Structure formats: structure tokens, C-alpha cells
Amino acid sequence: MNPRALSLYLVLDPGLCAGPGLVETARAAVRGGATMIQLRDKEGGTARMIESGRALRAALAGSGVPLIVNDDVQAARVLGADGLHIGQEDMSPAEARARIGADAILGLSVETEALARAIDPALVDYAGAGPVFATGTKPGHKPAIGFDGLARLVAASPVPSVAIGGLKPGHAGAVLAAGAAGLAVVSAICGQPDPEAASRALAGEIALAREGV
Ligand code: TZP
Ligand code: MG
């Protein structure tokens, strides 16, 4: 996996993208510069995941933006998704890797330095590191780690990390300075009145931060 794909990682949650809908939000985000899309649906079950995933796959075809499925390996396989993202409480990375195949992207959420250090780079392609800030998007999330904690997780991880949790415009410089490959966001794009403009603003900030401006 090219770590640049982690630059602006949109996590699409149907609960928060109810306005324009998942597909329109994804299209707008990609026009604005999103580099990876995850479908995360904690409520709808595998059937809805497959239905939404099919529409997203069609919308993303030819864009070069990978589609990642959260947790649901069955949906990921049926969809032929580009990858799977799992948390610490989901199946093990070894099982996930065995079920999605050698070529798919596998992401793992890590909330502590010890978990980041424990990543097996032979199995996992990237770490989702956070939450950087407290967020209403994920009730009951682990304690916020801040930018200092993020830097420690990134340093401990043997694979590229994407930061997540409460990230908004204004945060890209600090996230990249902490060593992360990019920002993963839900509410900073999903549910914004203009998801394309929101993505473009974040992507622009990330580009500026890379230039060291
Ligand atoms: N994992 C850790 S925080 C989080 C997830 C899925 C939610 C991030 O949402 P937001 O709206 O970008 O804070
Ligand atoms: Mg999970």
C-alpha cells in the first residue's frame, strides 16, 4: 500500500451522511481530494453493508481511491473491497489476513503505544491511531491521546499510521508533524454542508504541511 493513500481518509458512516447520502458524499470527497474511503456501518448488518458497498464501488471505479470495509469480512469479500479495517476487539489480524488474502489492504486500530508496537507488519498495512481528541462520533471511545500521544504511537508502529478522532481543519500540520501519514475523519467531511469544499480544505492543508509551509 502506498502510504500516500492515507493522506485524507474518509470514514463514511451512514448515520452521519444522511443528507446527501453515502455515494454523493464519497464522490464529493474524492473530487475534493480524499485518498481513501472506509465504509463503516455499525447498525445495518452485512446485507446493508453489501448494498452500500456496491454503490460505493461503482462510484469509486477508476478513481484510484481504495474502498475499505470496516469489520465485516464477509461484506469485504463479497464486494471485492480493496481492504478491511479491524479494531482490537474484532477478529485477529492473522485471521483477517487469512480471510481477505495477501493483496488486500489491512488496517488495525491502535489506542496505545504498546498496541502500536505489537503490530505485525507482515499482516497489517497501516495503523489507525487515536483517538487524538474526544469525539461524539464514537461513543465510549478510548481516552484521547493528543498530538504527543499520537507521536508516540506513530513512533512505536512498524507500519504507517493514520490519525483519527476529532480531527478538523487546522489540525493537519500537527498530525503530520507527529509523523502520521494522514488524517482519517468522519464528521469533518461527512455531514458537512459542502463535503467537497470540506475535503478540499483539508487536502490543501495536508499539501501545505508536506511542503513545510
Ligand atoms: N475511531 C476512533 S475515533 C473515531 C473512530 C471511528 C471517530 C472519528 O470521527 P470524527 O467525527 O472524525 O471525530
Ligand atoms: Mg471494529
Image: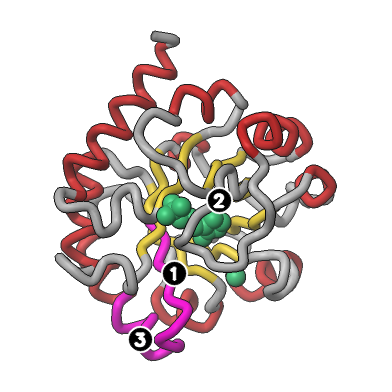
Please name the residue that numbered disc 1 is placed on.
40
Q: Is residue 41 magenta?
A: yes
The residue that disc 2 covers is 134
Dot placed on the residue nearer the N-terminal end, 2 or 3:
3
Q: Secondary structure at mark 2?
A: loop
Quarter of the image with the C terminus is top left
For numbered disc 3, what is the local secondary structure?
A: helix
Q: Position of residue 96 (x, y in %)?
A: 66, 70
Residue bearing the label numbered 3? 48
Kind of residue indicated by mark 1: Arg
Query: Is residue 196 left or right of 165 when viewed as pictured?
Result: left
Q: Amino acid at mark 2?
A: Ala
* Position of 2 relative to 46 (above/below): above
Residue 166 placement (x, y as % from top left): 47, 47
- Horizontal relation, residue 44 to residue 52: left or right: right
| Dot placed on the residue nearer the N-terminal end, 1 or 3 | 1
User: Start and end of the magenta stretch?
Assistant: 37-52
Q: Nearer the viewer, residue 147 or 123?
A: 147
Label 2, label 3: how many angstroms apart (C-alpha)?
28 Å
Indicate yes or no: mark 3 CB to ligand 2 under 8 Å.
Answer: no
- Answer yes or no: do the residues labelled 1 and 3 have beta carbons within 8 Å? no
Question: Label 1, label 3: how many angstroms apart (C-alpha)?
Answer: 11 Å
Rounded to the nearest angstrom, the CA distance separating label 1 from label 2 is 19 Å
- What's the residue at 72%, 56% (across, down)? 123
